[in-house]
Amino acid sequence: MNPWGKANETKTNGSASAALLASGIGCFTLAALAFAADKSAALKLQLIFYRPTGPLSGVTSVALAIWIILWLVLDGRWKNRSIALGRITQISISLLVLALLLTFPPFADLLPPH
Amino acid sequence: MREIWTMVHGMGFGALFLLFFSGAIFELYRATSGTALQTTPNQRRWLEIYLFGMAALAWLTVLTGAYVIYPWYRAVPPAGTTNLALFSQRLLLANPGTAGWHSIGMEWKEYVAWFAPIAMTMVAVVYRKYGDQLRNHRQMRTALLSFVCVAFLSAAIAGFFGAMLARVAPVQGGRTLQLMRQPQ
């Protein structure tokens, strides 16, 4: 028992792993979609969900939907499990760094269109 | 109306989020460090409120930016318009000397800013779920602190370009907001 009268049961790291990985993938998806929309005029048109905001509306809506759905699915599968958190952290932070780079226009311009 | 929304977006939600950052990183580190004293339920609840408040500020910043201010910024002028003062994007692109503010500044800002609410929501939810137990999961604590730093970095990039764009091509059309008049 801790001083506040609650049992000190140690939680598994599955829920945190799901949250970390989903947010890393969510950010990367947003950056990848932004990059793809910049390179493909057809995709750019498809991603205009709200005309005044342009493709930003579609890029962010799709990425947020993928992030939330993935988070719920992973949490459902992992919440009672212990996951190799070190690897999940590495993957999530790598995706986040890649996402930061991919949204930086001079870096994205270096990459080929397809 | 445009000035007010721009101020609410940048000086209100965005600046407050950036100001809260140092408190979040310090409190999160202190409350979950292996050598820290046990936090009381009240302290934990306040840190939860603080982190969820930051996530809410980040969401309000990106949503007002994307759906209130950005449409003014990217509005297309009617054919034959010569005064582009109310069409910030076109005004910037019309001059090679200012085009970079759009092609680098705004194009980076409009997407990178969204990392902040995603990261802060995740951090707030994980802290709510694990609380003091984060001190038993060192890697998890390090990952959360890294995500808070990335949230700050992305908000700082967006904030910097937002502030600079507001000086170069303000969405209100370049009128100055006069606080006081010089006596005649």
Image (cartoon, coloured by chain):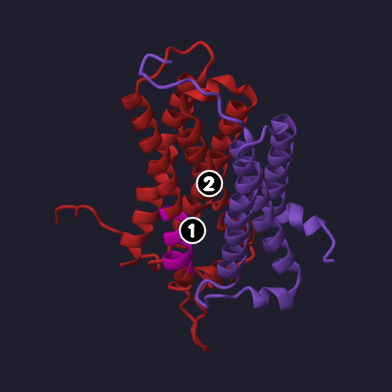
Residue designated by label 1: B168
Q: Is residue B153 left or right of residue A93?
A: left
Q: Amino acid at mark 1?
A: Val
Image quarter of residue B68: bottom left
Q: Colour of chain A?
A: purple
Extent of the magenta region: B60-70
Residue B90 vs residue B116, the one in the foreground: B116
Q: Amino acid at mark 2?
A: Ala
> Badge 2, how many Cα within 10 Å: few under 14, some, many 20+?
many
> Badge 1, how many Cα within 10 Å: few under 14, some, many 20+?
some
Q: Residue at x 67, y 54 (%)?
A: A103
Q: Chain of mark 1?
A: B
**Measured along the vertical axis of the image, is residue B73 above or below residue A100?**
below
Residue designated by label 2: B116
Q: Is residue B173 left or right of residue A85?
A: left
Tell me how far mark 2 sits from mark 1, CA to CA. Answer: 25 Å
Q: Nearer the viewer, mark 2 or mark 1?
A: 2
Q: Is residue B75 left or right of residue B95?
A: left
Q: Quadrant of the N terminus of chain B?
A: bottom left
Viewer can see residue A104? no
